[in-house]
Image: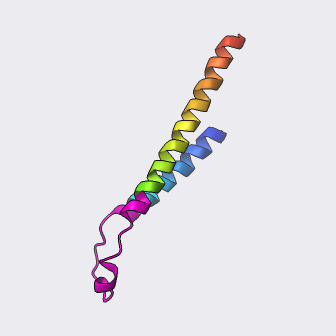
Amino acid sequence: MKFLKQSAVLAAVFGLLSMLAGPASAASAYDPLTSSVTFVEAIAAMMAVAAVVAGLYVTMRGVRTVLGFIRR
């Protein structure tokens, strides 16, 4: 159950990050000011951290499974 909650949280985070990374569909009066600001590097860094955390969770789950096989 805990793994399912963590998966749901990770899915929500990835969904929000993908919306932030997408192009803006509506033009605003602030386009000249905001056109020079880019969050590509920040989003890439957050995705890299999320991938490392997901990899750690997968590794921990694998270790638990292997240890469970050994204990039997």
The answer to which of 34 and 70 lies nearer the viewer is 34
- Describe residue 38's horizontal placement relative to residue 58 as left or right: left
On the image, the x and y values in percent for residue 45 come to 45, 55
Q: Is residue 53 magenta?
A: no
The answer to which of 55 and 68 lies nearer the viewer is 55
Q: Residue at x 28, y 85 (%)?
A: 32
Q: Residue furthest right?
A: 71
Residue 63 vs 57, above or below: the answer is above
The answer to which of 44 and 2 lies nearer the viewer is 44
Could you tell me which quadrant the N terminus lies in? top right
Q: Residue at x 45, y 52 (%)?
A: 47
Give the total of numbered labels.
Answer: 0
Colouring rule applied to residues: rainbow
Residue 26 vs 60, above or below: the answer is below
Residue 57 vs 49, above or below: the answer is above
Could you tell me which quadrant the C terminus lies in? top right
What residue span does the magenta drawing correspond to?
A: 20-43
Q: Residue at x 35, y 70 (%)?
A: 38
Q: Residue at x 53, y 49 (%)?
A: 10
Q: Quadrant of residue 3?
A: top right
On the image, the x and y values in percent for residue 11 come to 49, 49
On the image, the x and y values in percent for residue 37 come to 35, 75
Q: Residue furthest bottom?
A: 29
